[in-house]
Image (cartoon, grey):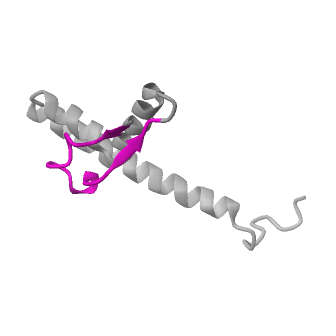
């Protein structure tokens, strides 16, 4: 027995021939795998966004939030990479 993502095959090219096998009649586990795949691909988020009409101010608010979040994440990633570097110079020599 297996589940095939036929519903999305026409709408999204990466789901052509995606199949999740059901082992030992564990349909719930297969559904979790399907939901994980849909979440990683961003299909669920796109579905939630297009489910209802989004007013223009809500769209602006969402887009601005996404931009701020991306800037913050990029800055934090840069800071974490700096801290985790092994060969950086000592900023305050002799303070140990």
Question: Residue 59 location in percent, x, y?
Answer: 16, 37
Q: In terms of depth relative to the viewer, which is nearer, 44 or 11?
A: 11
Is 51 on the left or on the right of 90, as rendered?
A: left
Q: Is residue 14 left or right of residue 37?
A: left
- Comparing 34 with 47, the one in front is 34
In the depicted structure, whether residue 93 falls above or below residue 59: below
The x and y percentages for residue 44 are 28, 37
Rendering quarter of residue 55: top left
Q: Residue at x 27, y 56 (%)?
A: 14
Please determine whether, in this image, residue 81 is positioned above or below residue 1: below
Query: Measured from the top left, where is residue 83 in percent x and y?
Result: 68, 59
Q: Which residues are magenta?
A: 2-22
Q: Residue at x 49, y 56 (%)?
A: 75
Residue 84 versus residue 27: which sits nearer the camera? 27
Quarter of the rendering containing residue 90: bottom right
**Quadrant including the N terminus:** top left
Identified at 30% across, 42% down, the residue is 4
Q: Identify the residue at horizontal 21%, vertical 56% (top origin).
A: 13
Pick the front one: 25 or 73 = 25
- Residue 71 in the magenta stretch? The answer is no
Number of marks drawn:
0
Would residue 13 be counted in the magenta stretch?
yes
- Please state the horizontal and vertical placement of residue 46, each as a whole percent of the image: 22, 40
Q: Quadrant of the C terminus?
A: bottom right
Quarter of the rendering containing residue 17? bottom left
């Amino acid at each position: 027995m297996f589940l095939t993502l036929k519903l999305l095959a026409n709408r999204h090219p990466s789901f052509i021939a995606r199949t999740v096998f059901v082992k030992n009649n564990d349909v719930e586990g297969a559904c979790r795998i399907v939901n994980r795949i849909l979440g990683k691909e961003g299909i669920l988020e796109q579905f939630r966004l297009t489910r209802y009409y989004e007013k223009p101010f809500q769209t602006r608010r969402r887009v601005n939030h996404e931009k701020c979040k991306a800037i913050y994440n990029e800055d934090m990633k840069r800071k974490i990479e700096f801290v985790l570097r092994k060969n950086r110079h000592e900023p305050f020599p002799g303070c140990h």
